[in-house]
Image (cartoon, coloured by chain):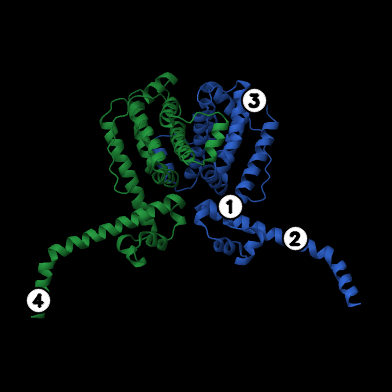
Chain colours: A green, B blue
Amino acid sequence: MSQTKTGSAATTEAPAKEPRGARRKRETRQRLMKAALELMAARGMDGVAINEITEAADVGFGSFYNHFDSKEAIHAELMREVLNSFGETMDHISNNLEDPAEILSTAVRYAVQRSADNPVWGRFLIQTALSADILSGLGQYMLRDIQRGIASGRFKLKDPLMAFTSVGGTVIGALTAQMEFAPADSTAKKVAQQLGLNLENIPERTASTVLQILGLTNEQADEVAHRPLPPVELRDSLF
Amino acid sequence: MSQTKTGSAATTEAPAKEPRGARRKRETRQRLMKAALELMAARGMDGVAINEITEAADVGFGSFYNHFDSKEAIHAELMREVLNSFGETMDHISNNLEDPAEILSTAVRYAVQRSADNPVWGRFLIQTALSADILSGLGQYMLRDIQRGIASGRFKLKDPLMAFTSVGGTVIGALTAQMEFAPADSTAKKVAQQLGLNLENIPERTASTVLQILGLTNEQADEVAHRPLPPVELRDSLF
C-alpha cells in the first residue's frame, strides 16, 4: 500500500515536478556558464578555479559536476557557445549579401563594434582566437570568407597564410584597441590623442584595412567598408 | 673589550659576509622572477598565486615579500625586463642600420624567430602587448620605428592608427602562428598543410607583409625582408 501511494504520488506530481527540475537544472547550468564566462574572459581558463565559478554563480561546489566534468569542459562549452552564436550571425550576414568583400567587411564591423559595446564578449573572443587551435575557433569563419573571396576573384593574394595571419591579427588588434579606448580614464586613448590619432569609426576603418590586405585598392575598400550595415539578428542567451 | 671584539669581528667578517648576502638575495630574486615568468607566460598574471611562484622557485612564501610588494609588482618587473631587453636589442639594431624599413623588418624577423625558438618569451611578449596599455609595452618600439619611417618618407600612411593596429596585430598573429606550428603534433600545422599553405620563412614573410601595410610595394617589401640579418646581441639573464 505504501508502495501504491508512493507510486500514485509520483504519478500525479511527475508532470509538474519534472519540468520544474529540468528548468532548475537548466537555470543552474546557465548561471555556471555566465559566471565562468566573466571569470575566464578576465583571466583565462587556467586562472580560474572551479570553486570561484560556483561561488560567483551561488551554487554548491559539488553541483558543478552535475553539469560539467571539468573546468576544461565548461571552457570548451563556452567557446562552442560564443563561436556558434558568432557563426550563426555570420551565416545570417552571408546569406543576405552577395559580395565576398561586403560579407567580410560586415563581419569585421560587427565584431569590432560589439567588442566595444560588450567587453566581456570581446575579451573572450580574443582569448579563444589566440589560445585554441587558430583554425578551429574564430579563424574558421574568417578563413571561409577569405576563401570565398579568392574563389570569386574578388581577393587577390600572393601569400594566403600571411594574408590570413594579417587579417586575423588586424581584427584582434582592433578589438583590443576598441576595448582599451573604451574606459573614460583610458591611458591608451590619452596617448593616442596626444599623437593626434583619429579614434572615430574604428569598425569601418578596420574593415577597410582588412580589405586592402586582401588586395582591394584603398578606394574600393573604403567604399565597401562604408556601405549601410544590414540588420543583424543576435541569438545570445549568455550575454 | 667585548665591544671591541664584536667590532673587530664585524670588521673582518663584513667584506666576505655582505657580498654573500647580497649575492644570495639577488639569486633568490632571480629564481622568483624565472618562476613567475614561466607561470605567468602560461596563465597570465591573474591566473598565478604567490605561493605557486614561491613553490616553483623553492623559496619560502614569506621571503617573496623581501623582494616584491605584490604579484602586480613582480609582473610589472617582468614586463620591464622583457621590454628592456627587447628595447636594447632594438636600439642595437637601429644604431647599425640606416633604412627605417630595414630597421622595422629586422625587429619583426627577430621577434617572430625568437618566439619560435623560445615560446615562453613569445607568449609573454604577446600577453604584455595585449594586456598592458598598448602604447607603453611592445607597441612603443613599433610606434617609434613607424614614426621614423613616416618622417623620412619611406612609409606612406593614410590612416596611421589603423596601420599601427594592423602592423601590431600582424606581428602578434605571426608570433602566435609560429608557436602553434612549432609542436611536432601541432593541429594547426596539419590543417595549414591540408590547405596547402606554405609554412617556410615566416619571419621574412611577416616582415614583408608589415612593410606592405606601411605602403611599400610587394617587390620593395620582399627585397628588404630578405636582406642578410645583422648579428643581434642578446642581453637576457632571464631566458
Find residue A204 and report its image quarter.
top left
**Mark 1 to mark 3 CA distance (whole Å):** 35 Å
* Residue closer to the observer: A175 or B206: A175
Q: Secondary structure at mark 3?
A: loop
Label located before the other in sequence (3 or 2)? 2
Label located before the other in sequence (1 or 3)? 1
**Mark 3 to mark 2 CA distance (whole Å):** 44 Å
Label located before the other in sequence (2 or 1)? 2
What amino acid is found at the position of numbered circle 3 in the picture?
Asp
Residue tagged 2:
B22
Discs 3 and 4 lie in a common subunit: no
Residue tagged 1:
B75
Tag 1: Cα neighbours inside 10 Å, few (<14), some, or many (≥20)? many
What amino acid is found at the position of numbered circle 1 in the picture?
His
**Mark 4 to mark 1 CA distance (whole Å):** 65 Å
What amino acid is found at the position of numbered circle 4 in the picture?
Lys
Q: At which x and y percent is residue B157? A: 53, 23
Q: Is residue A22 left or right of residue B98?
A: left
Looking at the rendering, in which quadrant would you find the N terminus of chain A? bottom left
What amino acid is found at the position of numbered circle 2 in the picture?
Ala
Tag 2: Cα neighbours inside 10 Å, few (<14), some, or many (≥20)? few
